[in-house]
Amino acid sequence: MNIDSINRGIVLDHIKAGKAMEIYRYLNLDNLTCSVAIIKNVKSGVMGLKDIIKVDDRFDIDLDILGYIDPDITINIIDGGKVVEKKRVALPRKLTNVIKCKNPRCITSTEPDLDQIFMLSDKDKRIYRCQYCEAQNKA
């Protein structure tokens, strides 16, 4: 299979196998007017299998979303066909409007304009808690 190289854009690499479509949806990549390539189940010596997303243009990336979905992702910024910058993401300490509280008694259920804010409460287990009602959400 051949996937063309990109001259100027972004490559999301080291995505846990099977997570590329989730990232595609969370980042709203379907709204971009440029080429987007999703490569699933690529063989990797370190990971076994991984996914890769190539975007043939630059766009604003929400690092919190990427860190929440998979904190091991690498972001490669491409210019002139070469990697000019490499970024790593981490599990964010605070998430705003990324996930929604599942507690029907939470104030966010009755106040739809209120931001959905979650704080990381257990890094090892990747558990977030709603700022308002303390309901638990696991990443």
Image (cartoon, rainbow, N blue to C red):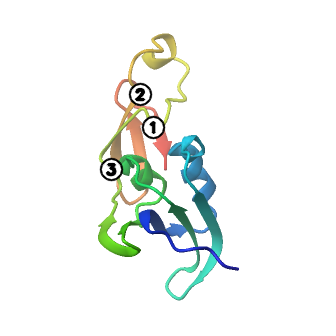
Q: CA distance from mark 1 to mark 3?
A: 11 Å
Q: Within 10 angstroms of label 3, few (less than 14), some, or many (20 or more) residues?
A: some
Question: Residue 118's quadrant in the figure?
Answer: top left
Relative to 13, residue 21 above or below: above
Q: Secondary structure at mark 3?
A: loop
Q: Position of residue 17 (x, y in %)?
A: 60, 68
Name the quadrant of the N terminus: bottom right
Assess whether mark 1 and mark 2 are in contact (beta carbons under 8 angstroms): yes
Q: Amino acid at mark 2?
A: Gln
Q: Amino acid at mark 3?
A: Pro
Mark 1 vs 3, N-terminal side: 3
Q: Amino acid at mark 1?
A: Val
The residue wearing badge 3 is 92
- Residue at horizontal 49 percent and vertical 29 percent from the top: 101
Q: Secondary structure at mark 2?
A: loop
Q: Secondary structure at mark 1?
A: loop
The residue wearing badge 1 is 98
Q: Is residue 73 left or right of residue 18?
A: left
Q: CA distance from mark 2 to mark 3?
A: 15 Å
Q: Residue furthest top?
A: 110
Assess whether mark 3 and mark 2 are in contact (beta carbons under 8 angstroms): no
- What number is the disc on residue 116? 2
